[in-house]
Image (spheres, rainbow, N blue to C red):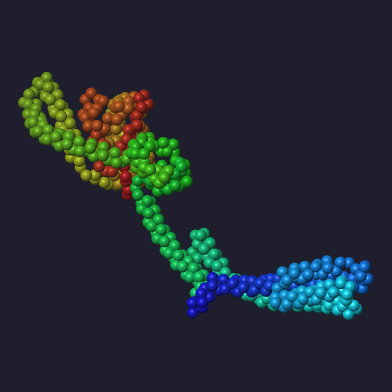
């Protein structure tokens, strides 16, 4: 049973067939070697013993026909014959051959005895006849053994040829069977190899069905299990990779993974912030940053970049635009400061307005009682100053109120022209021209009062700063309304331009420093912004940006 189980395996079948073929070949080889040894021994015996003995016997027989005085030394010939027989005994194999050689020695003894008797001169014709008969018998024995051994050699050769042909006849079908077994057994290996190459190329191989229960079948089943595990792992990795990519793409900060100066991974935020995508070269400004946190200024933008090592030789850069955050922080600080100032001013204004009202009332009463022109002029001056103080307190209250925007449909171009028309007489006396351009008859949702106060404040400031031409341009920029007020006045130095929106900062001798501060606060309360660009000797430009909707 164990043997049958062993032959069920591919290795057992192949090795069994190879072992059987090898045993047949070894058997044929052993048989041929044995036959050749026997033939070799027979040939050696013939060549070394029987043939020399036959020749020597023929020479002895020839010497017997000569006269005694003409004969050669028979003793030397007989000694040579005995030596040949002894050599034959040393080479011979088999009892039969040794027996014949011993018989040859006995016969030589008889010949030597007869020769000795003939040599004494006492023997007659009978002794010579006996010697001749002994010699003839020895020669006949030699010739018979030569003939017998020659026939045996021929039979051994024929038998070796038959056996070789028989074994060859067995080996050829056996070899064909072995080739068929190898081809049948190795055919699934080709199928399995093709599936392995498909798996190596990244494809999904199908199931490998090779049948049977041998090693190839076990290997195919193991490969199927491995392919399923690899496929499952790939799906999990793809799902995780997709999830990580979604997380990376949803991050607000810009993320770059860089190796050897080349961007390997970039999320959409990186493309928006730096205009970089995968396979782009990293700009020198970013490539030269050391590990750690950095703050970069790019024009009007403030960027924060964190550099950290990634992998063996890579780096990861995380960047974020802090411009709006810093502006919001600055806006919050400014708003809190204005709120605090507004509260203080509101309290002060409340305390001041009551005495001002009383003074104004008593001044009016005095004006009714007094009729002298000089006295009336003095009271008129008092009334003017009281009204100026009331206007100042009203501005302080505007700063403290922080009213909610009141949106309504307005035509911004018409609104700007109405402001220019309102100030036309005053501007004409100052020698200032105002030009308003923009789209006609387009209504948008804005707080008209805030926009009107802002334009009025900017136009008056430009005129009072010494400008001769003021250009107001209204335009749309996507969802925003842009209004630019540009003048040709003396301009502002950078330090002054940086402080124009600060509360209580003014370049005018009698200015309160609240106009632009209140204007910016009201515009920012609507979600907009106001910016200034100025250069000494080249005029000043204010840009108001407001988010609006079409009416």
User: 170 or 8: nearer the eye?
Assistant: 170
Is 195 displayed left or right of 393 in the figure? right
Residue 323 visible? The answer is yes
Tell me which residue sits at (24%, 45%) in the image.
Answer: 406
Q: Position of residue 228 (x, y in %)?
A: 44, 66
**Residue 23, percent from left and from top:** 62, 73
The vertical placement of 326 against 102, above or below, is above
Residue 144 x/y as whole percent: 81, 78
What residue is drawn where x is 84% and y is 70%?
56
Foreground residue, 161 or 386? 161
Counting the numbered discs, the total is 0
Q: Is residue 51 left or right of residue 62?
A: left
Q: From the top left corner, tell me how far across and down residue 27 is, in percent.
A: 64, 74
- Identify the residue at horizontal 77%, vertical 68% (top origin): 83
Direction from residue 536 to residue 127 in the image, left or right: right
The extreme top residue here reads 374
Res. 143 in view: no
In which quadrant of the rendered view does residue 80 lie?
Answer: bottom right
Q: Is residue 196 left or right of residue 479?
A: right
Q: Quadrant of residue 92?
A: bottom right
Q: Residue at x 27, y 40 (%)?
A: 328
In the image shown, does 243 or 314 lie closer to the viewer? 314
Identity of the residue furthest to the front in this view = 122
Q: Is residue 135 above or below residue 429?
A: below
């Amino acid at each position: 049973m164990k043997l049958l189980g062993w032959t069920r395996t591919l290795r057992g079948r192949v090795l069994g067939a190879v072992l059987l073929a090898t045993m047949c070949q070894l058997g044929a080889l052993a048989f041929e070697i044995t036959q050749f040894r026997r033939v070799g021994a027979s040939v050696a015996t013939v060549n070394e013993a029987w043939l020399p003995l036959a020749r020597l016997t023929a020479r002895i027989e020839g010497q017997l026909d000569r006269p005694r005085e003409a004969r050669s030394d028979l003793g030397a010939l007989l000694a040579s014959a005995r030596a040949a027989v002894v050599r034959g005994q040393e080479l011979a194999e088999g009892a039969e051959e040794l027996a014949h050689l011993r018989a040859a020695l006995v016969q030589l003894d008889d010949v030597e005895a007869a020769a000795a008797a003939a040599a004494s001169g006492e023997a007659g014709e009978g002794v010579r006849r006996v010697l001749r008969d002994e010699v003839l018998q020895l020669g006949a024995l030699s010739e018979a053994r030569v003939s017998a051994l020659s026939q045996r050699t021929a039979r051994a050769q024929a038998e070796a040829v038959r056996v070789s042909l028989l074994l060859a006849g067995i080996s050829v079908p056996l070899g064909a069977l072995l080739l068929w077994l190898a081809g049948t057994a190795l055919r699934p290996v080709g199928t399995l190899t093709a599936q392995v190459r498909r798996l190596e190329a990244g494809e999904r191989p199908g199931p490998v069905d090779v049948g049977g229960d041998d090693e190839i079948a076990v290997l195919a089943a193991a490969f199927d299990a491995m392919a399923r595990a690899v496929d499952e792992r790939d799906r999990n990795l793809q799902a995780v990779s997709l999830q990580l990519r979604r997380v990376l793409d949803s991050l607000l900060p810009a993320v770059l993974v860089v190796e050897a100066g080349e961007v390997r991974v970039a999320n959409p935020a990186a493309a928006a912030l730096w205009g970089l995508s995968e396979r782009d070269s990293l700009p020198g400004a970013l490539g030269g940053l050391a590990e750690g946190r950095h703050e970069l200024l790019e024009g009007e933008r403030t960027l924060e970049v964190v550099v950290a090592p990634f992998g063996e030789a890579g780096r990861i850069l995380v960047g974020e635009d802090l411009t709006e955050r810093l502006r919001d922080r600055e806006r919050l600080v400014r708003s809190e400061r204005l709120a605090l100032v507004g509260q203080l001013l509101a309290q002060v204004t409340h305390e001041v307005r009551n005495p001002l009202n009383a003074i104004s009332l008593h001044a009016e009463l005095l004006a009714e009682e007094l009729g002298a022109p000089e006295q009336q002029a003095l009271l008129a001056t008092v009334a003017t100053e009281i009204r100026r103080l009331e206007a100042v307190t009203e501005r302080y209250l505007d700063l403290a109120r922080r009213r909610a925007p009141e949106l309504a449909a307005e035509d911004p171009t018409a609104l700007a022209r109405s402001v220019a028309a309102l100030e036309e007489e005053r501007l004409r006396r100052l020698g200032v021209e105002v030009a308003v351009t923009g789209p006609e008859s387009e209504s948008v949702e804005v707080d008209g009062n805030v926009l009107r106060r802002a334009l009025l404040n900017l136009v008056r400031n430009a005129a009072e700063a010494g400008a001769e031409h003021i250009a107001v341009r209204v335009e749309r920029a996507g969802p925003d309304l842009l209004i630019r007020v540009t003048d040709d006045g003396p301009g502002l130095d950078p330090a002054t331009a940086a402080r124009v929106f600060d509360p209580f900062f003014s370049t005018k001798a009698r200015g309160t420093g609240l106009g632009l501060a209140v204007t910016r606060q009201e515009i920012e309360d609507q979600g907009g912004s106001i910016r200034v660009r100025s250069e000494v000797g080249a005029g000043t430009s204010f840009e108001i940006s407001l988010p609006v909707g079409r009416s």
